[in-house]
Image (cartoon, rainbow, N blue to C red):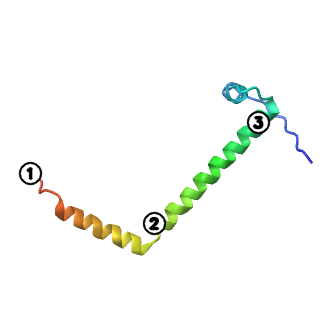
Amino acid sequence: MARSLHVRLDGASSAALDVVRAGGMSDSEAVRTALREAAARRRVRSSIREEVLAIAADEADCDEMRIIREQMAELAPSPRD
C-alpha cells in the first residue's frame, strides 16, 4: 500500500525540488527520487564509517603503519638549524 505525505517546503527546499524536477518529473517522482538518492548516500557513508572503525581497530595494521612511519622518519633529511 502506498504511503502519502504532506510537507511544507521552505525556500531552500522548494528550490531543491525545482532542481530535481528539472528533468520533467512530477513532484511525487522528484521526492521519491531524492529520498532514494539520500538513503543511498547515507548507506555509503555508514559503510565507510564502519570500514574506518575496523581499520583503526586492527592492531596489526596499526603496528605496521607505526613501523613504516619510523622507517620514513629515518630516511627523511635532517632539519636545518
**Residue extending furthest toward the left:** 81
Give me the C-alpha separation between circle 2 and circle 1.
Answer: 34 Å
Left or right of 68, for residue 39: right
Q: CA distance from mark 2 to mark 3?
A: 37 Å
Amino acid on which disc 3 is placed: Val
For the point 34% across and 71% down, the residue is 64
Horizontal relation, residue 63 to residue 3: left or right = left
Q: Residue at x 69, y 48 (%)?
A: 39
Q: What's the mark number on residue 28?
A: none
Along the polypeptide, which appears first: circle 2 or circle 1? 2
Name the spot of residue 72 as percent of width and height, x first: 23, 62
At label 2, the amino acid type is: Ala
Q: Position of residue 22 (x, y in %)?
A: 70, 25
* Quarter of the figure with residue 23: top right
Q: Earlier in the sequence, mark 1 or mark 3?
A: 3
Tag 1–tag 3 contact (CB < 8 Å): no
Corner quadrant of residue 16 = top right
Residue at the spot of label 3: 31
- The residue carrying mark 1 is 80
Residue lying at the far right of the rendered structure: 1
